[in-house]
Amino acid sequence: MSLSPRLEALIDAFCCLPGVGRKSAQRMAFHLLERDRDGAAHLSAMLGDALEHIGRCELCQTFSETDRCPVCQDHTRNPELLCVVESPADLVAIEQSGDFSGYYFVLLGHLSPIDGIGPEDIGVDRLLEQIRQRGVRELIMATNATVEGDATAHYIADRVDESVVTITRPAQGLPVGGELGVVDGGTLSHALRGRRPLTGQFE
Amino acid sequence: MSLSPRLEALIDAFCCLPGVGRKSAQRMAFHLLERDRDGAAHLSAMLGDALEHIGRCELCQTFSETDRCPVCQDHTRNPELLCVVESPADLVAIEQSGDFSGYYFVLLGHLSPIDGIGPEDIGVDRLLEQIRQRGVRELIMATNATVEGDATAHYIADRVDESVVTITRPAQGLPVGGELGVVDGGTLSHALRGRRPLTGQFE
Ligand SMILES: [Zn+2]
Ligand SMILES: [Zn+2]
């Protein structure tokens, strides 16, 4: 004999989560049924609620419960600065750093020909339209520091017209507070090539 | 600014899953909303379905969609053998080994005074009643090989009356196919203390 059909179906459903294999999925299903039925009911309800009410901002494509997200509704920002990121999580991380006063465009992914994800899937045309409409002067390509993120940044940079004066990528280097010995070789090499004068000593 | 309230609520809801912290929960929520809305709807439905239809077997306490589970409904089994396990997953694992022909009792946990889990929470009285009703002669205490599993096994063994002739614990030792060098010290020590004659050579 095996588990009951509905329990099997629940375990299968958990397998759609990233990083969750059959064994973790079973542990999740058992945990909820044994010890946290209220949590399971809440998760089920919140999933339904999110699917029903969370869409994308019509301007920047980030997750939003309203037609335009709070950032796009904030008219005190600098429209000449646009930061392109892969995910809503990146937007939140940059907002929390407090160093950026422009608007965003969220690709919700990166170009990946092997997975059939082309420019139209990540909204490149909508991005180019945003750049024109907002009169963007500096475009910060904050896609991930990965092969795909780099390729996506370069593809978009090639398609942006000359009205955009500057196109930048965030600096790569040592994490703040990071120890040299635990940083990977690629990061270390970027950090060394991008070395800058020690303020006060050389400037 | 932060994430939308419904997205925050969904991330919080995922945190109720075992082994899922805030960061994994966010990755799960984003993955489903970005890439797998069908999967999310399915998970929500299967959770609701499981909560509505999966209860416990009235005899052995395992998860069941019917009053009595398929094992308890199988009258070809040996009622004199009863195997006590902590979880429905353990029941399935033992069934799959194919070596057991008796019935089960699933505690759905173990005694844990520190968490306020006492005998009544794991159904010890129902177990004792099952033992009497089925006329059990051998009780296999297959609770986990942990401090809590051992304590639970001993507590139950003390409360079983003399009609049960034998109370056993599964042997502890090397896993089949296991290499000596990668086995932990406690297991190795059990394996050595429980050493048996090599069949054919010493018998
Ligand atoms: Zn927006
Ligand atoms: Zn049963």
Image (cartoon, coloured by chain):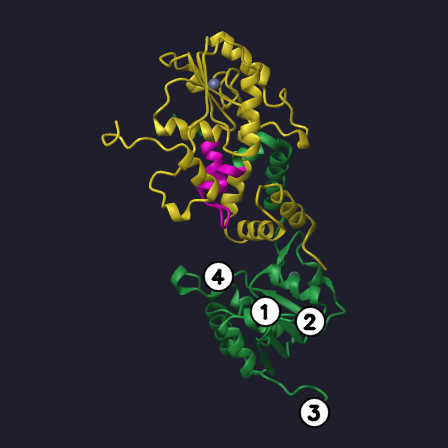
Chain colours: A yellow, B green
State the CA–CA distance, disc 3 to disc 2.
Answer: 30 Å
In the figure, B65 relative to B99: above or below?
above
**Figure quadrant of the C terminus of chain B:** bottom right
Q: Which residue is mark 4?
A: B121
Q: Are marks 3 and 2 on the same chain?
A: yes
Category of crowding for the residue at label 4, using alpha-carbon neighbours closer than 10 angstroms: few (below 14), some (14–19), many (at least 20): some
**Figure quadrant of the N terminus of chain B:** top left
Q: Which residue is mark 3?
A: B203
Q: Amino acid at mark 4?
A: Asp
Quadrant position of residue A160: top right
The answer to whether the residue labelled 2 contacts the one labelled 4, judged by CB atoms less than 8 Å apart, is: no
Category of crowding for the residue at label 3, using alpha-carbon neighbours closer than 10 angstroms: few (below 14), some (14–19), many (at least 20): few
Q: Which mark is residue B102?
A: 2
Viewer-nearest residue: B183 or B186: B183
Looking at the rendered structure, the secondary structure element under dot 2 is loop
**What chain letter is assigned to the residue under label 3?**
B
Depth check, mark 3 against mark 4: the one in front is 3
Answer whether residue B22 is magenta in the image: yes
Q: Amino acid at mark 3?
A: Glu
Q: Position of residue A30 (x, y in %)?
A: 57, 53
Q: Are marks 2 and 1 on the same chain?
A: yes
Answer whether residue A202 is magenta in the image: no
State the CA–CA distance, disc 2 to disc 4.
Answer: 24 Å
Q: Are marks 3 and 4 on the same chain?
A: yes
Closer to the chain start, of discs 2 and 1, is 1
Depth check, mark 1 against mark 4: the one in front is 1
**What chain letter is assigned to the residue under label 2?**
B
Q: Which residue is mark 1?
A: B84
